[in-house]
Image (cartoon, helix red, strand yellow):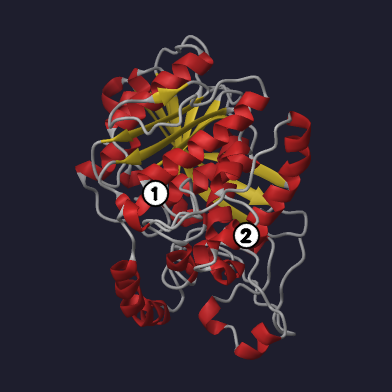
Amino acid sequence: MASNTGSSTPRYAPIPEDALRLPDHPELVESALGAFRQWEEEYFRRQICDESQVAPFTLPPIPDTLEAWEAQKPEILAAAKEHLYGVMPPPPDKLEIKLLAERRDALGGTALRREYRVYCLMDNGRKFDFDMMLYVPLGAKTPPPVFVVENFYGNQGSTPDTDVLPSRAFAQPRRNFKIDRMNCAACIRRGYAVATACYHEFFPDNWDGARKSIFTLFYDDLRPDYEITVEELKAGRHREYAAYSAWAWGYGRMADALEQIPLVDATRLACVGQSRLGSASMWAGINEPRFKLVCVNNSGQGGAPLLRRNFGGRLAILSIGRCSFWVTDRVIRFVDRENELPFDTHQLLGLIAPRALYVTSSSFDLNADPYGTFLATAHASKVWNLYGKKGLETTEMPPVDTPVGNFVRYHVKTGDHSITPYDWERFYAFADDLFGKP
């Protein structure tokens, strides 16, 4: 992958292994955020959350034959990279793992917990590392399947255990409602292993995050958008990388690490993400076939909801404002012109076929467009039909707390923007059907 040096002086700098992944100039990041707060207020004032105001739209069709779909897939994937998620970097040339800590009576004596540092190494000498926490049920007769999850709050803030090494990234204080998001203890009770890493370690979630991200393996010039001059933009400079692809890349590297750990069965992996990480888990599932079950929880804009529906969150919030680095800068040309996109999310979800897919919504989270999420999942089901598998097999939005589907499943739970034990229980049940109860 070519580096995008913006001047004669390379800007690549290795990240010290023990350094926190915080911005070098936090005051600039905060200033940039402040500049967009008024815009975000106006964006939400204009937001449509009334079905009667949804403009008509036409979705790009899914072909009627498997041969035609297979021929179309590379075009859809390339368009998604160019116009939304950014380039997906290749794996590192080499990956090594180092055991940092182990506890054999974790989670109240039900699990073995291991904490690893994962080193991503390139032949040119560049390197990047992140910390992964793994729980495995004690007494498992065979290596269990693994739920692979990226967390928001650091590994230490994602478990009831209080002796976990802190992630080298921004992490909010521990609170029980946040710990419950990971559902580690319930996962172990169901017989599954769970592996997690903090998403801030792959790409810190701020405008200057690229300079502390996985893209240091591949690029020299990682300046945030607010440092790019108008002259450079006029000359054709584009930011082809984006945080969504970094977070999705992180899921793939956890899969790489798990293949080196005989305690678990790395041929039976499920990826799970919530909110922006729901979008990342979806993009990871599209690009990484080792995930046999892809769980896209309450993903919102940039994830499963149809892009052409002018309801709830829209491309404008991703392309202009505090989230702009999540996506490639080419997104901006489609703001209020979503109908001109060369793809929509039903096609992106279809790229996961014929593997298993579970998509969810929350009933009160209109910003994440539950109905648009259902429609995308329902239309995507045609692809599973082309492979001879059953998808949702319904075009009617199900009642709340009523899962529907077969090899593709969907539910909308009662509640706000969240991942809850209800969601996790549905994911475990799908994994039981797919992998066999551990």
Image quadrant containing the C terminus:
top left
Badge 1: residue crowd in 10 Å (few <14, some 14–19, many ≥20): many
* Residue ID at (68%, 54%): 89
Residue labelled with disc 2:
86
Question: For this rendering, which residue is in front, 229 or 125?
Answer: 229
Question: For this rendering, which residue is in front, 390 or 330?
Answer: 390
Residue 26 position within the rendered picture, expressed as x and y whole percent measured from the top left: 39, 76
Q: Amino acid at mark 1?
A: Ser
* Residue ID at (27%, 37%): 180
- Side of 323 where 344 appears, left or right: right
Image quadrant containing the N terminus:
bottom right
Badge 2: residue crowd in 10 Å (few <14, some 14–19, many ≥20): many
Count the marks: how many? 2
Q: Going from the N terminus, do you reach mark 2 or mark 1 first?
A: 2
Secondary element at image label 2: loop
Residue 273 position within the rendered picture, expressed as x and y whole percent measured from the top left: 44, 42
On the question of residue 165 being in view, the answer is no
* Residue ID at (52%, 16%): 435
Residue 283 position within the rendered picture, expressed as x and y whole percent measured from the top left: 57, 46
- Side of 176 where 64 appears, left or right: right
Q: Seen from this angle, which residue lies furthest top? A: 141
Q: Amino acid at mark 2?
A: Gly
Q: Is residue 300 above or below residue 108?
A: below
Alpha carbons under labels 2 and 1: distance apart = 18 Å
Question: For this rendering, which residue is in front, 243 or 50?
Answer: 50
Residue labelled with disc 1:
275
Q: Is residue 237 above or below residue 105?
A: below
